Image (spheres, rainbow, N blue to C red):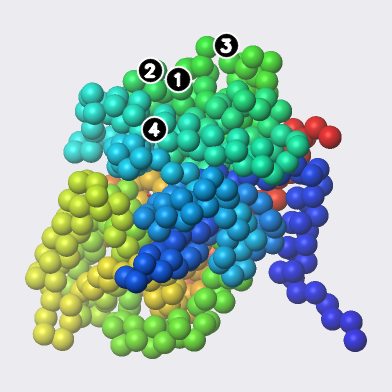
Amino acid sequence: MMTTPSLASQRSSRLLELLSAVLHQRRLIVVSNRGPLEYHMGPDGRMEPRRGSGAVVTALSPLVRAYPFSWVASAMGEGDRKAAEDAAGQHIASPVPGQQVVVRFVVTPRRVYHKFYNIFCNPLLWFLQHYMWSAPYTPNVDATVYDAWEGGYVPVNRAFADGVLAEARDMGQQAPVVIVHDYHLYLVPAMVRQEVPEAVILHYVHIPWPSARMWQLLPTTLRAAIFQGLCACDVVGFQSQWDVFNFLDGVRAFVPGAQVDFNGRAIELQGRRTVVRAYPLAIDVAEVRRIAESPRAQEYTKKLAPLCAEKTIVRVDRAEPNKNIVRGFKAYHLMLERRPELRGKVKFLAFLVESRTHIKQYERYLEEINEAVRALNQAFGSEGWQPVQVFYENNYTQAVAAMRLYDVLLINPVSDGMNLVAKEGPVVNKRNGVLVLSETAGAYDQLRDAALCTSPADLEGTAEALYRALTMSEDERAARASRLVEAIEREDSLDWLHRQLQDLGPFVKV
Ligand code: G6P
């Protein structure tokens, strides 16, 4: 009997067809700071390979499952460093089940990596790109920052470019197709282009690209290197049209000799053409739903259900300043002050993952979060009811289980490239939950009509939005929830990849 292939496998074979049509035998090399594979060293010294954590790995998981390619990534911890040493300059075939990739670890001296990651990428570039260079987050661009650029950002980018070149040499006769991810690696495209002019290069930026005015806060030489470096790409990809416009405008302002075509969203520089496009990141809807239905998630749902109240607000975030967690709690505080009738009837469950804890701004922010939580529980808590409960755990399954249970999902970042929780929540939620969404999250463009939207610093507006969401009629909740699901299901992570590959196609000369 003939069986019909599932939708997922049909879509995956479409991706494979497109890959072979676009690549024409060229090797695909993906480049990102965090890779698909991490080695953890047990107490007995045994090495345990695990799937890498991080948004880039999740975004590329359909590709990792379906297609053999090379991934160049940092050796993040001691386990990775040891594995890289054992591999003696060769790449490693990923031992993680379901992964077809080979991984080439980039090893840089710890001090150099510290300057790269803890001083330059985060918080400096991250805060700048999230519009957070305002008191108290504006760093002094002093000798430490210049040193972090010269002695951290540049050499780590160089080491990545060398990793790409080594991988290209080992894996094929033809110039590779290289896809670089994120703000850690803005200099890699130009470095690779210089050595392999025929390489086809795309750089995808997952975080917001701010306006030229913001970039002017970065010294001229550093800014020029970043903008010019990206002009070495064939395609530069962003999350939203805002980012595309800001990038084109920045190139116009900062790159001498560049011709910027705003209508065609393209740049001509020294006889080369770069196209600039928005590819809003999507989720693997089927996969998130599978996790939500898994026995482990069901267990968590059972555990969490008794913690809910008549109405439950949920948030799921890395504990990080741009997620605006403190203002979210302050808005909730305000709402409980103004609407005493809701006390005892609402519960706020916050699922926060500690992040970048070596950076002082992050450490301080954790204290601010805890302070806001204490203030709320002290002001309104009673014997049988606490208004907030925070879970500090890196436990994705538990977070997905919580997303099934919310009546209101609060996502109020100061600024966010996309925010995938805004897409994951609605597709697994079981209560026609309402999404309260900041206008400055990338997801706003696609979900604005069905969400209740707020401006991130507006405590009054956010408090009012929470109240409206908690007291909305069943009919309106249901209508909004189904519009959210429709908007999210319209595109998934395979479409995201498809669109990038399609735009790369014309640059691959056969
Ligand atoms: C977020 C962003 C990604 C970025 C990552 C880095 O998840 O959405 O674009 O690559 O942060 O996080 P890390 O934990 O590696 O500093």
Q: Which residue is mark 1?
A: 224
Residue at 20% x, 52% y is 363
Q: Which residue is mark 3?
A: 257
Residue type at mark 4: give it. Answer: Tyr
Task: Quote the CA–CA distance across marks 4 and 1.
Answer: 14 Å
Residue type at mark 1: give it. Answer: Ala
Mark toward the start of the polypeptide (4 vs 3): 4
Q: Nearer the viewer, mark 4 or mark 3?
A: 4
Quadrant (top left, top right, bottom left, bottom right) of the N terminus? bottom right
Q: In x, y percent, where is residue 51?
A: 50, 64
Q: Residue furthest right?
A: 1
Q: Which residue is mark 4?
A: 153
Residue at 34% x, 86% y is 303
Quadrant (top left, top right, bottom left, bottom right) of the C terminus? top right
Task: Quote the CA–CA distance across marks 3 and 2.
Answer: 16 Å
Q: In x, y percent, where is residue 132?
A: 30, 39
Mark 4 residue crowding within 10 angstroms, few (<14) / some (14–19) / many (20+): many
Q: Which residue is mark 2?
A: 220
